[in-house]
Image (tube, rainbow, N blue to C red):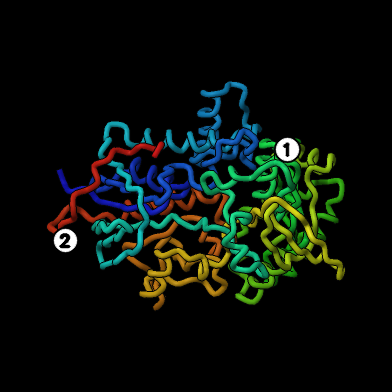
Amino acid sequence: MSEPFTVAIVGAGFSGVMTAVHLLRGTGPRPVRVLMVNRSGAMARGVAYGTNSPAHLLNVPAGRMSAFPEDPGHFVRFAQSHDPAITPGTFVRRAVYGEYLEHLLTEATAGRPDALSQIVTEVRGVEPDRAWATVTTADGRRLTVDRVVLAVGHYPPAHPPGFSTDFLASPQYIRDPWGRGALDAISGSAPILLIGTGLTTLDVALDLHSRGVSGAIAVSRRGLLPRTHNPKIPPPEAIHRPPGIESEHTATGYARAVHQHIKHLDLKGDWRQVIDSLRPITSSLWQRLNSIERERFMRHLRPFWEVHRHRASPETGLAIEQLLNNGWLTVCAGRLLSAEATSAGANVNVRVRGTNERRVFHVGAVVNCTGPANDIRTAGDPLLNELFHWGQARPDPLGLGIDVAEDGAIISSNGESSRVLYYVGPLLRARDGEGTAVPELRVYAARLARTILESIPAPIASARPEPPPWPTAAFDPRL
């Protein structure tokens, strides 16, 4: 039997898992062996599906969450095997989707248990050659593989400006609410201040409420909460796409076209249909914008786009509405100025939006719910920093992600596409404007796996260095 073609996948969230699944299910001139490397040890979970809270639901109905676009009912059937009451319109618990991804990995290795291995460690460097690459890990291993796929990108939130280093280092500040046990030390005796008002804030608020915390205050510059899905609204049709939007080349032009079309439709449609009609062309619209217009969008329009585009489930929306109505949750639009740790928690200074009024909130703790850091140049990822240093990859001008070719190959500092180093995941937002939702990522993962499978050479004598012993641990998603 010919020598297996080895692919190392760095990261084990949705993007990494689905790339592995497609590689293992695919065919080529040589058998494929996949090594998944993940520093947290939580395989097939990632940030999105690692939660076990029953209050944390998918923000997309089950019928649109299949990992395989050619089989829309795939996830629904899996979910129904656990709960027959689930329908395509159900917003299921996120933990169930993590179980689904585990199932896909296990199923893909049926009859080939040695085709998938895992290492729980951090990758510190990748040394690409013309036909292979050497992966260096934090525990000192050097693994020679044929291809490397980076599937990383969810980094801890950026620290809010104005907060002192002393406060950021204090136990009263929680930078990443998704860290293991991050919220366990919070007591219920004082309200908690949540930085941000996006989907993460909704999840954290519901979690804190279930823990008996006395209340929460959510602060963001505009105080915008995500809108909710309406299951009664049918999918968009051709009439819902703003006419002429594809001839625009400015962020303001896009916003004006969307606003005018929603107003024009009036009772003939719902704003959700207009927003959803843009999904197939979002990447092309983004690519029409130059760097100045992209920055303008990120600075001025992104908050409005995100609360309409990334909506909450009806159940989550209703639960948050109840917390707002009974006063447990309050929202403040304003700018964070400073925070000071106290023996009882923290004092946080906020300038209220549109006024000179300053308010001081006395809270038990501060939780950063702003989501993954937007600027990868300051995210502190040792691997990306190493790749940037040696010119093996380059950030886009806004730092939203890295430059990636259409086939997934990482582009070096001199503009060349790598033959062995690829990327799939949320950092594709630099190229396509978005890259965090399953309907897009499942296509990217399948496309990348196909590209890699088609690049596998026929078995011939190779000058590749003899690799060290392959990890022998069988795949165990529970690690």
- Label 1, on which residue? 314
- Quadrant of the frame with the C terminus: top left
**Relative image position of residue 5 (x, y in whole percent):** 24, 51
Which residue: 74% across, 47% down? 191
Farthest-out residue, top: 84
Q: Amino acid at mark 2?
A: Pro
Residue 465's label in the rendered image is 2
Which residue: 83% across, 43% down? 327
In the shown orientation, is residue 354 left or right of residue 420? right
Question: How far is the residue under mark 1 from the one under mark 2?
Answer: 55 Å
Q: Is residue 296 or residue 74 the one in the foreground? A: 296
Q: Amino acid at mark 1?
A: Pro
In the shown orientation, is residue 260 left or right of residue 63? right
Please tell me whether mark 2 sits on a helix, a strand or a loop: loop
Q: Is residue 410 or residue 29 the one in the foreground? A: 410
Please determine whether, in this image, residue 345 is positioned above or below residue 69: below
**Relative image position of residue 453 (x, y in whole percent):** 32, 51
**Relative image position of residue 384 (x, y in whole percent):** 42, 66
**Relative image position of residue 168 (x, y in whole percent):** 60, 62
Is residue 195 visible in the rendered image? The answer is: no
